[in-house]
Amino acid sequence: MRLFLLPVSTRRTLLYCQRAPAIPKKQTISERIQSKAARTWADWEKKPGGWQKLVVGYGNQALRRIPYEEWGLKSVPPLSTARKEDEQAGKIKVEVVYPKSLIKAETITSILHTLSTERESLHKKRLLLCFLGMPLTIPVGIIPIVPNIPFFYLVYRAWSHWRALAGGRHIQFLLQNKLITPVSSPVLDQVYADQDHPLPSAAEPTTTTGTSANLPESPIITEHPSPEKAPNHPEGETLLLSQENAQRITRLLDLPQLEVEIERAIWQVETAIAAQNSEKSGKASEKQPEGGATSPPPASITEHDKKKQ
């Protein structure tokens, strides 16, 4: 198993887990359900039209908006008893690959701790809400032909939150037992060094706390690019990676499955930066008087003017 820390902006880092090739074995019930759902979704995507195609269209949009932090934690496998014993015995090595030009080796532990714990309470709350909402979807199941889409969506989101919680706890276990080995990557350093700047930026971080709203505040975990590359907002947030270079990373690391994860993360951060800049410009225009210009202040009355009066 190998973990990757990929800075997306000066305030956010993507976590991704590359699993070791699995030994062929009998699938668990959970794995069979996941495989069946994936095949069904793929079949629906191939439909020329109809409600299945409509569901897939809206579903893919919803999936893209699920926070990339959640996807990152879901990429980490749950900590089974067998895996726990193997990791403690040193049979499974866990490397953390990172660009040393942007992340200091001594901060890796704190970064992983933040990424694995900051959303824990959020996932617990959302998991509970999904369970509470499932009974409310029962009336939809009465409709003939069309399946109970709201119910299946809540089931998926409940599973997603559970997997994110399990992934976070696995990382916490690795940290507590000091089972991670930082490995700097010259490939990542070169890609980030070759990145053309400036990229989209905001005067303030797109989230004032942590990597998402209503989460504990986390420190800046990447160094800011050199001033000539990102001169506008040194105290705010600046994108560090373009979609083009993200694809380059997946090619050089030979991780095609990483492409969709990093593409989603960049899109979400870029969208957040654009939204904040739009909000700031909107507030600025509201403060400006109608017509766009301000009247000069009235001239003060001088002693000479007083004598004339």
Image: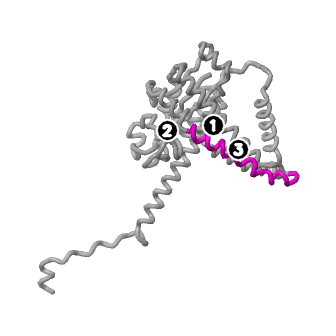
Q: Quadrant of residue 267?
A: top right
The numbered mark at residue 240 is 2
Local secondary structure at mark 2:
loop
- Which mark sits nearer the N-terminus, 3 or 2? 3
Range covered by the magenta-colored residues: 119-145
Q: Amino acid at mark 3?
A: Phe
Q: Which quadrant, please, contains the N terminus?
A: top right
What secondary structure is the magenta-colored segment mainly?
helix
Mark 2 surroundings: few (<14), some (14-19) or many (≥20) residues within 10 A: many
- Residue 129 shown in magenta: yes
Q: CA distance from mark 3 to mark 1?
A: 20 Å
Q: Quadrant of residue 269?
A: top right
- Residue 142 shown in magenta: yes
20 relative position to 40: left or right: left
CB-based contact (under 8 Å), mark 3 and mark 2: no
Local secondary structure at mark 3:
helix
Residue 210's x, y, as percent? 49, 41
The numbered mark at residue 131 is 3
- Which mark sits nearer the N-terminus, 3 or 1? 1
Considering only vertical position in the picture, is 78 above or below 261?
A: above
Which label lies toward us, 2 or 1? 1
Mark 1 surroundings: few (<14), some (14-19) or many (≥20) residues within 10 A: many
